[in-house]
Amino acid sequence: MKQKSWNINLEEMMQAGVHFGHQARKWNPKMASYIFTERKGIHILNLTQTARFLSEACDLLANASSKGKQVLIVGTKYQAADLVASASIKARCHYINQKWLGGMLTNWSTIEKRLQRFKDLENKEKTGVLNQLPKKEAATLKRQLVQLRKYLGGIKYMTSLPDIVIIIDQQKEITAINECITLGIPTICLVDTDCDPDLTDIPIPANDDARASIRWILNKLTLAISEGRYNSIKTE
Amino acid sequence: MAANAMLANRMTTAPLMAVASSSTPSAALEATPRVFGVLARTGVQSMRLNSAMWGMKLQATVSPKPVKAGSSVAMAAYDDDEIEESEEDITAAYEALYGKAFEGLKKGAAVDENLSDDTRGRRGDRRGGKNADDKMEERVVQVRRVTKVVKGGKQMSFRAVVVIGDKKGTVGVGVGSAKEVITAVQKSATDARRHLVTVPMTKYLTFPHRADGEYGAAKVMLRPAATGTGVIAGGAVRVVLELAGVENALGKELGSKNPLNNARAVVEAVGKMKQFRDVARDRGIPMEELWK
């Protein structure tokens, strides 16, 4: 595995606010080794460890995407929703930024049925069949299409279970993490001071509340994915 | 500038701690030209970058130290999401990577909604589906009628316990319940396929050593036997051992006689068994040592 520096700069991280944790009394003691100190009742994360984990995650992503593996990015927090969508579109990954429906991975065969319905409705919309139906039916179908687009828009192109899953907030997406554990899918997760680092394969201790912090980390990860893919295209 | 460039060269090859402890953010910001090339070519036909524009934007936002116009573009350009890609470009890029949308959906995933006009005469082949592919033999150990009592009365359903095996060392025990017996048997077969274990067997098709297994109140004792003995065990234990392909073994149900729990206890017992080669590998010694 080649050692490549991903230009992870500690000062940039501090500017983005990656080092802020949550309130000291809400912490998870398993994060003790990743916490630097406590200031004014807030835990501060140790950024050198963050840098190490982030570089490990980037290496993994670059390696995986150079072999054509599929990545799914999950982030349903209000602050993270649009960031996740834009980052995944840039990196050409699948994403889920609205509610994580229960069983999306473990009950994939049922979700496929919804995707099939999505496909049917989109075809109908394209061919203009919807305009020929009576008003009420057309309205119902259009509403269904809007709902499907909202929840499943990011996984339109997903054909089977993803190979790696990136999760933004562990506490919020605990269902997603449990599904990945059941299925044995490796996960990369942004863990904050109130999360459990043992649940995920590569925890990245970082602030999961601030938009700047999420954006900065997603940029690094998606850059790694794009790099890996470019390398595979170049060597073909 | 020369010192900066040298520092940049060392940065890209030095380990991460050096970056972490350095105090020159500009040096770390200078990405290699190759990375910039990545962004120009990733996303196939979609990214429209104007390097001069990005360079100026960078200088406005980041450090006031002098930064070469073209070099650090890559990192910051990625940070800014001002790249406008049209819908068709995004779609084209995704399709180039993953194939057309919804392409991977299997035919059987189609759902019978009123207004879909795909032909839906596919009820027949959905039954065989996933379970017919692997060459596993199924045997039903127990089917019993179970009841759920609700306000209106009793709701009956059937619970089936099925053991699956390929007679070559893989077995699985599964449970499933449904309103009809056949559906319950199918469900339990699917469940059994999710919980397969391998049985360690010697070349005489028997166990390597004695083992006890417990599940709930059921306790099972398994013992290897010489060739020609056959499987001497009762009920659920016999079914599991036969489907595993074990030909000579002794088994006894010591605790409760519940079939499901006994089958699971056999699976537990078999999981505890070790072959000589596994022990030698775990201890890091050659196999001959174990027989001395």
Image: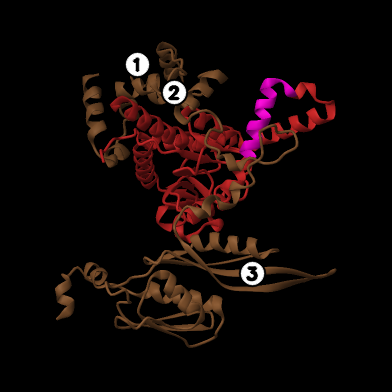
Between the residue at mark 3 and the residue at mark 2, the CA separation in whole angstroms equals: 53 Å
Give the chain of mark 1: B
Image: magenta residue range: A114-129
Left or right of B206 on screen, residue B193: right
| Residues packed near mark 1 inside 10 Å, few (<14), some (14 to 19) or many (20 plus) | some
Mark 1 against mark 3, which lies toward the viewer? 3
The residue tagged with tag 2: helix, strand or loop? Answer: loop
- The quadrant of the image that shows the N terminus of chain B is top left
Query: From the viewer's perspective, is residue B144 above or below residue A21?
Result: below
At x 44% / y 52%, what residue is drawn? Answer: A37
Judge left or right: residue B233 versus residue B122: left
Magenta span contains residue A110:
no
Looking at the picture, which amino acid does disc 1 mark? Gly
- SS at mark 1 in the image: loop
SS at mark 3 in the image: strand
Of the numbered discs in the image, which one, if any, rests on residue B43? 2
Amino acid, disc 3: Arg
Name the spot of residue A27 as percent of width and height, x first: 52, 57
Calculate the distance from the C-alpha at mark 1 to the C-alpha at mark 3.
70 Å
Q: Splitting the image into 4 quarters, where does residue B35 fall?
A: top left
Q: The chain shown in red is which?
A: A
For the residue marked with disc 2, what is the amino acid?
A: Gly
Front residue of B173/B20: it is: B173
Secondary structure mostly seen in the magenta stretch: helix
Where is mark 3, residue-wise? B159
Q: Which mark is residue B70?
A: 1
Q: Which residue is drawn at 43% across and 14% down?
A: B56
